[in-house]
Image (tube, rainbow, N blue to C red):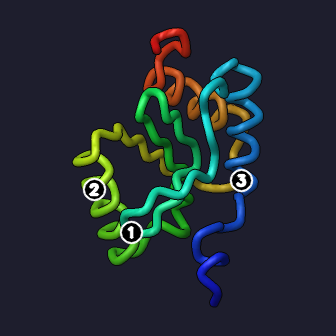
Amino acid sequence: MSFKRQMHPKVSKAEVEVFKALSAAGLTRNMVTQKTIILKSTVPDFCWLNKRKIVYLDGVQAHLSDKQQKRDEEIQELLTEQGWEVLRIPYEPPLSEKNLKEIIETIKKFVGTLDEE
């Protein structure tokens, strides 16, 4: 497997749906997606650089194993030590409209208003 393939995972359908909903909610200003952060080769799903906030959508099927949960915890600790706030949102695909709304509300509370810069 190539390094590039490891660093740029396929974007999930849930990530696309959440991005569209974040955009509709006006939460994409100053946000980047799939921003590589060199620690343990982590690529956050959504990242607000100016607020140092990161959101991961953790599909339960990919984050269920003890090994993956340990890796997720290590990455979160490393990011926190570097001054990042990290929000992990577990979800079961496919996302329902209700789940999507709950995720967006959770992210809104986490990110705050975009005028707080």
Mark 2 is surrounded, within 10 Å at the Cα level, by few (under 14), some (14 to 19) or many (20 or more) other residues, namely some
| Mark 2 lies on residue | 78
Q: Is residue 100 above or below residue 63?
A: above
Pointer 3 or 1: first along the chain: 1
The disc at residue 40 is 1
Residue 39 found in image quarter? bottom left
Report helix, strand or loop for mark 2. helix
What separation in Å lies between label 2 and label 3 (alpha carbons)?
Answer: 30 Å
Residue 65 found in image quarter? bottom left
Residue shown at 73% from the left, 30% from the top: 21
Q: Nearer the viewer, mark 2 or mark 3?
A: 2
Report helix, strand or loop for mark 1. loop
Residue shown at 63% from the left, 23% from the top: 27
Residue 103 found in image quarter? top right
Furthest residue toward top: 115
Q: Amino acid at mark 1?
A: Lys
Q: Is residue 23 above or below residue 82?
A: above
| Mark 3 lies on residue | 94
Direction from residue 5 to residue 75 in the image, left or right: left
Tag 1 and tag 2, C-beta contact below 8 Å: yes
Q: Amino acid at mark 3?
A: Pro
Tag 3 and tag 1, C-beta contact below 8 Å: no
What separation in Å lies between label 3 and label 1 (alpha carbons)?
Answer: 28 Å
Report helix, strand or loop for mark 3. loop
Pointer 1 or 2: first along the chain: 1
| Place of residue 55 in the rendered image (x, y in percent of width and height, measured from the top left) | 49, 42
